Amino acid sequence: MADRILPISGTLHGAESRRGAALEWLHTWVVTVDHKKLGLLYVVYAIFFLLVAGAEAMAIRIQLAFPHNHFVSAETYNEFFTMHGTTMVFLVGMPILFGFANYLVPLMIGARDMAFPRLNAFSFWLTALGGLFLYFSFIGGFGLYGMGSAPDVGWFAYAPLTAKAFTPGHNTDYWALALIVSGFGTLGTAINIIATTLSMRCRGMTLFRMPLFVWLFLVVSGLTLVTITPLTAAQAMLLIDRYLGGHFFDAQAGGSPIVWIHFFWIFGHPEVYVLVLPAFAIANEIIPVFSRKAIFGYPAMVAASVGIGFVSLTVWAHHMFTVGMTAVGNSFFVLSTMVVGIPTGIKIFNWLATLWGGRIRFATPMLFSIGFLFQFLLAGLTGIMLSVAPWNWQLHNTYFVIAHFHYVLVGAIVFCIFAAIYYWYPKATGKMLSETLGKWHFWLFVIGFHITFDTMHFVGLLGMPRSIYTYEPDRGWNTLNLVISIGGFIQAIAVLIFAWNLIYSYVRGKEAGNDPWDAWTLEWSTPSPPPSYNFAVEPVVRSRRPLWDLKHPQDPDWKYER
Amino acid sequence: MTCGSRVRTYLSLLSKWARPGADPSLCIGSESAQGLPSTDGIANRDRKLSTMRSQRSGSSIRARLTCAFCALGSAFYASAQGPKAIPSILAPASTPANEIYGLSLFVLLITGSIFVVVAGLLAYATIRFRVRESDGLNEPPQVYGSTQVELAWTVIPVLIVVVLFLTTARIIFAVQNAPKPRSALDVTVVGHQFWWEFRYPSLGIVTANELHVPVSTKDDPRPTYLRLLSADVDHSFWVPQLGGKTDLIPNHPNEMWIDPQQPGLYLGQCAQFCGIEHAKMLIRIYADTPREFEAWVNKQQRAGAQDAWVAQGRRVLETEACMNCHTIVGTAAKGTFGPDLTHLASRATIAAGAAANTPANLRAWIHDPDTIKPGALMPAMQLSDEQNAELVAYLSTLH
């Protein structure tokens, strides 16, 4: 129905018919309820905002390259770091990862589509509307300083800075509305993924034969339902405070700013896992294929993922060690945070064991996955350092924290996103991405990444706080900041190479064929790109690696799997 | 015995192992080899020495490790540019900062060891198990898992977590629940957009942005207890060399304490985003010797000198809008929205550290604060040049 040819008014002759065909093509993308098209829409939408928020990051880095720099004004700087954070989390990270889920989950479980295709389309367009709301503030959200002011309260937007008294104008309203709207989109997708995995699996695919990718998205979706809700509630309270005379966060009338901090981090910390578990999902697919081995310890991986999901709900106040909790309260959150390290450690060891004894092929997706493993290890270890409350009293809100969470968000998640795009681009387009450009992309990005974010740890240890638009020249931070900025630009060049690769390979890329990586999950049994009906016949599976069974009839998995 | 103290007694057993004792001579040696710059009247070497002496000495392996970290720390330190100290958390100068520093070395040791082992395994695996020509298209043996191995790598992290948690909890209680001695000085810190108000309730002093506290030594412990309040939005008080940061949150009074062991100037700044000029909400803490501190207190307790030759300037202050926001004891100005100016000339900086306290800067600031600190809440005062000059002449006499 969605792909039905739609009548476009007017006669269809010559040049007009070409225009008509283009319009019709566009129309199919707008009205589509096909999970693959929606998945691609998510990915393209997210890559667009990746470039936008990346440009904001570059402006931030130019400003900080030198002390007392005047590249942007204080208010513009504050807008940029607020928009950079909000965009990267809500308009890049979540959409792109849910885009992968949209595209791949039905294919991996042998289904025709998501459980609720219309809800799926609705969710995407809500998310898109959220992005539009947020960026419209640059034009319509006038703040303190005249017309057109983006939100400038930080992506964490601590009350009472967001109160009418301190932030007049509408920019904070656009911020809150954008997150409410895109939050509902995210909730819809999460419900859809849960319903799909629980009810749409093909014959023979028990829960314990699902690819780990699907398992992780099941956990992520459950987590999303629990975490987006408090965020939406907090935004509603904020708007009530701002417009309806509420006092949720107003200390002068019995409210408490700490309520906001709790609500935000009850959302905010599990949110990190909403973003990083999909990265694990991607690594779980790519590392085994390029090591030519089954994933080591599948049941332990499932248990660790579910465990991380639950434990992540108990750690939020480790963002609040400096707000003045009791010693007992602080100690509790130290312990719960450190406990996350145990299932995470299990995952890292299982990935190592998967590599062990394999025959590792270093195609670009695998390079990014190895980068992910290394950086995620370091990110986990700096996470342990930050969980040590007394040390956190020093490190909190410094560039050490910025370095730590960029190690997670870029070093782990963005690396996995790149790996996923190099891995599944052939499936989605039928063309291979250029390996040469891919290697340039990888090496430039990994070098730029380490120049930037390794250095950030040190400038944080030297006492540089976050969110400052400039700094004093005599604090010893000058050289380090210049180095960080240079690394940032190397990464920007790498991302531009990547964007060029996406376009160039779409036109000039090698034909991919059904199964270019010699992989084992069901999506590789379909043509590239898959037809709208996905599978001509419903597949039947007997193990976790159905294509391995087909390729090795003498040595199938189902004989050995526990 | 209360529950809390029992926990502490138990945890102190661990402390013997956890606390990085060190041979002071080794550390100082490695530090001077790096060419530590002496800065702004703060004798870093002496400070480090006394710090190290105050800690118990441990095994030689730990001493050497600690020294390696000290060398690392001083390497950061050696990157100092200009005469002022870097507000580094690796150069602790007060008991809470020291406790944290010791704990951080211990955590660094554990996490560093984990990194070496796991990253080593990763590097080995990627090199050893890369595909070779001879492999052809053969698949490697398929291994699906091993319960014993997986149990092993679950138990080891559990043990590490137990050790890390107990040592951490000990330091949390040691810093947060430290008993307050009778000799402690109380200061109330009020965070404002974008400056600091310091009140000494027992001494009757109110000042801004530059905090004077007495040096605290083992023989004469005089820690300063800061009660942290906010007048508007969230702020965070942070002077890295003296201790961790603590937030100032409206209607949620917090407390922290510092006891600088060496006299001199310690730098810090607001560490919680608080609005447009968050970046220029700087803190200066002067740790004074007992005699200096007494002299400072005596001077601050007196009303500012009101010289006759600047009476014109005083009249400008009392008749223009200045008096709505500022207080100068002994005049009609009793406003509380802006910093107390009674002893303005005794401070080294204006605008919360954004500029040096010179007549030229004062004139520029009064003419239009945005030239120094765009977004500061003080309005441009719309004075004539003559009025401005008279006002600055008056303010410059307020020692």
Image (spheres, coloured by chain):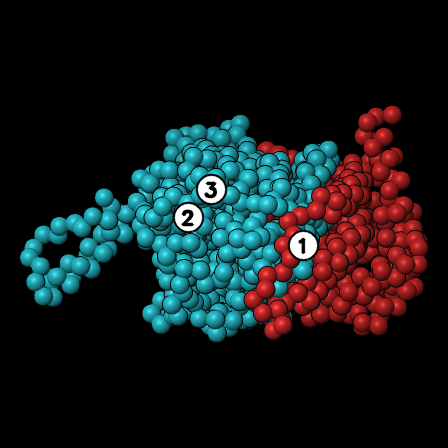
Residue A257 — which label?
none
Q: Nearer the viewer, mark 1 or mark 3?
A: 1
Residue sitting at x 38%, y 41%: A114
Q: Residue B16 vs residue B224: left or right?
A: right
Image quarter in which the N terminus of chain B is found: top right
Q: Are marks 1 and 2 in contact (CB under 8 Å)?
A: no
Residue sitting at x 41%, y 41%: A189
The chain identifier of the residue carrying mark 1 reads: A
Residue A324 versus residue A545: which sits nearer the camera?
A545
Q: Position of residue B114 (x, y in %)?
A: 75, 55
Residue behind mark 2 = A107
Residue A162 — which label?
3
Check chain identity for marks 3 and 2: say if they share one. Answer: yes
Disc 1 from disc 2: Cα separation: 27 Å
First of labels 1, 2 by sequence position = 2
Residue behind mark 1 = A353
**Residue found at the very far front of the displayed protein:** A554
Label 3 crowd (10 A; few <14 / some 14-19 / many >=20): many
**Residue found at the very far top of the displayed protein:** B1
